[in-house]
Image (tube, rainbow, N blue to C red):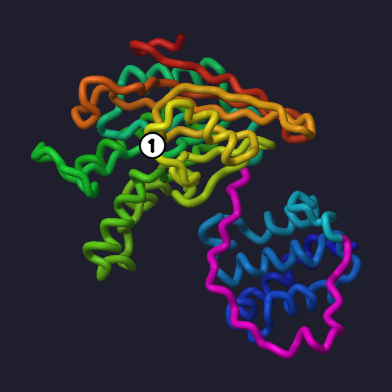
Amino acid sequence: MTSKKQIIEWLKKQEEDIQTSALTERELATLFCKLFPDSKFSWHTIRRWIQLMRNGKLIENNKVDLDEIANQMLSNIDGAKIFETTPDFSDPLSNLIDFPISWSEVNEPVVIQGIKRLGVCNDLHIPYHCQYGVRACFSEFKKREVDGIYLNGDILDMEEMSRFEKMPTKMYLKDEIDVGRKFLDSLRKLFPNIPIYWKDGNHEKRLQSYIATRCDELANLYGLDIPTQLQFDKYDIQYVPEHKVAKFGKLWIAHGHELGLKSGTVNIARQVRMRVGVNVMFGHWHKNQNDSSRNLADEVHSAWSIGCLCYLKPRYTGVLNQWTQGGATIDLHEEGNFTVSAFQIQDGVVI
C-alpha cells in the first residue's frame, strides 16, 4: 500500500512541474496511478488535487499543507472509492485533439472539520451592528460551549464602497475597518482557543467590486483585501471567499447571495430549500425561518434562515421591515448527521 511519505515526496517533486507541465491533468493523474498502482485512492481524486494545484488554490487559499493532503487522500474522505478504476486512454481518438487547459476556477465547498458543536451567525453589518444582539448571540455560544464559530457573511457593512446613496456621516472605510478589528479582538479574547471562520458576504464583496469597476489599477496591490485589512493572521481567522459555500457534515452553509434568489421573498426558507434540494443554513435575508419537506425517496431536507445581528431599523428600510435577530448552534454526529438548535433574539435576550 502506498505510504504517506511516498505521496508527500511525489507531490513535492511534481509541484513545480504541475504548474507548467505540457501534460494534461488527465495524463498527470494517469502517471501517478501508474507510479503508485497499489494506492487506494482513485484517478479522479488525484486529478482533482492536480487541478487545484495547477490553479494555485491547493496550498495558498485553502491553507492545506502536504501532510494534510496525504492524510485526506489516505483517509479516503474525498470519495476515492466512488471510482475504482483508472480510465483507459488506449483509444487513439482520445489524442487527436490537444484541448487547451481550462481557465475555470476550482470552486469546491469548504469542509469544516475537527469541530463537534459549531456556532453560526451572520449579518452583523459592523459598524451598524446591534451591540445587544451581538452580546446575546456570543454569550449563547459561550453557554452552549461551542468549539468552533462560523461568521457567515456580511460581518462588515462596507457602506463607503456601496453603489447606493450614502449619508454624509464623515465616517470612512478606515473607521469601519477599525471597528471590525476591535470586534475580532473581543471575539478572540472570548473564544481564545477555537477555530473561527470568516465568510465574506455580498457586503464584503463591495471592496473587490469597487476596485474592479472604479480603480482597477489597484486590483493587484498588496493589502487591499479583507484578510489583510482585518488582520486575520493576528487573530488566527480562517477565511472563506464570498463565492464559496461550506459543508458541516451533511449540512450546507451559505450566506445566501450565492444562491441566485432575489430579496423580498415572504417565505425565504421554503424558497431556498426548494432551490438547493439539500439541508442548508443561511442568512442574507435577516429573517428567522425554518422549512422542511420529505421527498419521494423518503429524504427529509430542511432549510434554516437564522436572522441577523444588525440594527433592525436602519434609515434605508423605512419605518418597517420584517427583520429579526438570531443565530444557531449545530451538533455533529456520526456519519455527518447533525442537530440544529436555532435561537431568536429579541431586545438583547435569547428567546
Q: Residue at left 62%, top 58%? A: 65
Q: Nearer the viewer, residue 23 or 184?
A: 23
Q: Residue at left 77%, top 84%? A: 94
Q: Which residues are magenta?
A: 84-111
Which residue is under mark 1?
Answer: 263
Q: Where residue 350 sits in the image (x, y, percent)? A: 44, 12
In magenta stretch: residue 279: no
Magenta part mainly helix, strand or loop? loop
Answer with left or right where residue 211 lies relative to residue 112: left
- Which quadrant of the figure has residue 169? top left
Residue 326 visible in the picture = yes
Answer with left or right where residue 130 lies relative to residue 24: left
Answer with left or right where residue 161 lies relative to residue 248: left
Answer with left or right where residue 68 lies relative to residue 281: right
Q: Where residue 222 sits in the image (x, y, percent)? A: 32, 63
Crowd class of label 1 (few under 14; some 14 to 19; many from 20; radius 10 Å)? few
Q: Where residue 9 sits in the image (x, y, percent)? A: 73, 70
Residue 193 visible in the picture = no
Picture layout, residue 229 above or below residue 213:
above
Q: Quadrant of the N terminus?
A: bottom right
Q: Amino acid at mark 1?
A: Ser
Picture layout, residue 12 above or below residue 284:
below
Q: Nearer the viewer, residue 315 or 169?
A: 315
